[in-house]
Image (tube, rainbow, N blue to C red):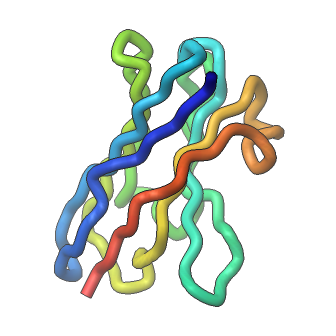
Amino acid sequence: QVQLVESGGGSVQPGGSLRVTCAASGFSTSGYCMGWFRQAPGKEREGVAFIDSAGTRSTADSVTGRFTISKDNIKNTLYLEMSSLKPEDTAMYYCAADRLCTGLRSGYRGRGTQVTVS
């Protein structure tokens, strides 16, 4: 059974840093594209960062230079390091996984972890 469990969210002041983690089970992260989405109240879900099975990374323009995605295939875990956080980064952050990055929006997804910047 595939499971994605996010952790590490919390409250932080503007300019601060936070790392969120996604523990995956039921599949091997080495063969999957994985990523982070976020959704703030009243707003659409936004793709934040992705890393494919080859390790190629991409980030949204709004977080480039501030957020870094990484994946540990031995621990089967995905990370998102966030720095220089802004109030507009406040959202529920979700981990996602799919065989292809093009399928991430409809692939496996965790329940999310809340990040609040204020």
Question: In the picture provided, is 103 more to the left or to the right than 90?
Answer: right
Counting from the top left corner in percent of width and height, residue 103 is at: 81, 39
Quadrant in which the N terminus is drawn: top right
Residue shown at the point (65%, 29%) measured from the top left? 33
Quadrant for the C terminus in the image: bottom left
Q: Nearer the viewer, residue 22 or 73?
A: 22
Left or right side of 83 for 65? right
> Total of numbered circles in the picture?
0
Q: Is residue 14 above or below residue 74?
A: below
The residue at the far front in this view is 1
Quarter assignment of residue 41? bottom right
Q: Hey, which quadrant is residue 2 in on the image?
A: top right
* Relative vertical location of residue 41 with respect to residue 24 in this rendering, above or below: below
- Tell me if 116 is positioned left or right of 89 in this view: left
- Between 111 and 40, which is closer to the camera in this rendering? 111
Q: What's the residue at 37%, 10% (across, down)?
A: 74
Residue 65 on image: x %, y %:
39, 57
Q: Is residue 47 above or below residue 31?
A: below
Say which residue appears at 33% left-offset and 49% top-offset. Answer: 7
x then y, percent, for residue 47? 64, 58
**Percent of width and height locating residue 29:** 54, 19
Give the vertical position of 110 relative to 42 (above or below): above
